[in-house]
Image: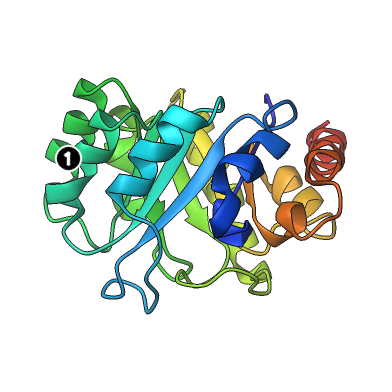
């Protein structure tokens, strides 16, 4: 597995987003953008205008995670705005296949996210429509939460499912990822890691990304 690190700007300084993006440009693989609408989750963050501006300012591709109601309506616009990857939540999508195909038609990678209590098995048949599965390792809505070990068995089951179906699908984890938890996620089968406070809470964000990657690669073998 090729390990990828996607720092979350939810933990960055919103007054200097271009600078914060540049701080990890040479060490990270993606820039993770958490879009929250204060409806699907109890928080309000960034929206389409910020994504459009970041696309112009950042050199890393944008990994947009839509924690919003009605992603079927809004997701294609994020791909059109320049996001390299757009992930919608299974719990919010009413027409996931149509929406995932629409994301892909705009040239972006299509992802499906599952909350900690949402099982992976009902979505196994959607693997051909996906480029990435995102398993939340905290309840979505806020940064800085404690990692939920209860999700580790689901990560393992999902990796087995992807392997058994020979699907070319990345397995991303988001929530509480740090130097203390990333190895457990990598051992379980994750290969794309969202890290917010572990990166932007460090004095050297680029060094933090490199340290996380090293731990994940060692654990993944």
Quarter where residue 86 is shown:
top left
| Number of numbered discs | 1
19 and 27: which one is in front?
A: 19
Placement of 19 over or under 67, stated as above or below: above
The x, y position of residue 219, in whole percent, is 83, 40
Q: Quadrant of the N terminus?
A: top right
Could you tell me which residue is drawn at 75 percent across and 57 percent down?
A: 198
The x, y position of residue 51, in whole percent, is 37, 42
44 and 128: which one is in front?
A: 44
Categorize mark 1 by other alpha carbons within 10 Å: few (<14), some (14-19), many (20+).
many
Placement of 157 over or under 126, stated as above or below: below
Could you tell me which residue is drawn at 65 percent across and 45 percent down?
A: 20
The x, y position of residue 61, in whole percent, is 50, 28
Element type at mark 1: helix
Could you tell me which residue is drawn at 62 percent across and 58 percent down?
A: 13
Q: Is residue 112 visible?
A: no
Placement of 173 over or under 168, stated as above or below: below
The x, y position of residue 32, in whole percent, is 52, 45
User: Furthest residue to the front?
Assistant: 15
Which residue bears the numbered disc 1?
99
Quarter where residue 130 is shown:
top left
- In the displayed structure, does residue 147 sit left or right of residue 58? right
- In the displayed structure, does residue 133 sit left or right of residue 190? left
Q: Quadrant of the C terminus?
A: top right
Quarter where residue 146 is shown:
bottom right
Could you tell me which residue is drawn at 12 percent across and 49 percent down?
A: 73
- In the displayed structure, does residue 210 sit left or right of residue 156? right
């Amino acid at each position: 597995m090729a390990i990828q690190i996607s720092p979350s700007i939810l933990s960055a300084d919103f007054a200097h987003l271009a600078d914060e993006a540049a701080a990890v440009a040479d060490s990270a693989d993606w820039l993770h953008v958490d879009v929250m609408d204060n409806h699907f989750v109890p928080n309000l963050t960034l929206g389409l205008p910020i994504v459009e501006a970041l696309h112009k300012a950042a050199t890393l591709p944008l990994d947009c995670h839509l924690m919003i109601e009605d992603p079927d309506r809004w997701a294609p616009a994020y791909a059109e705005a320049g996001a390299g990857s757009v992930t919608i939540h299974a719990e919010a999508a009413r027409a996931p296949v149509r929406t995932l195909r629409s994301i892909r038609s705009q040239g972006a990678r299509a992802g499906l996210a599952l909350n900690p209590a949402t099982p992976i098995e009902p979505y196994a048949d959607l693997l051909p429509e996906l480029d990435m599965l995102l398993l939340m390792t905290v309840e979505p809505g806020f940064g800085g939460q404690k990692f939920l070990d209860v999700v580790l068995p689901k990560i393992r089951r999902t990796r087995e499912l992807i392997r058994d179906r020979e699907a070319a699908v990345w397995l991303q984890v988001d929530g509480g990822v740090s130097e203390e938890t990333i190895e457990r996620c990598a051992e379980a089968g994750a290969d794309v890691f969202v890290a917010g406070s572990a990166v932007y809470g460090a004095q050297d964000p680029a060094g933090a990304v490199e340290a996380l990657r090293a731990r994940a690669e060692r654990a993944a073998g």
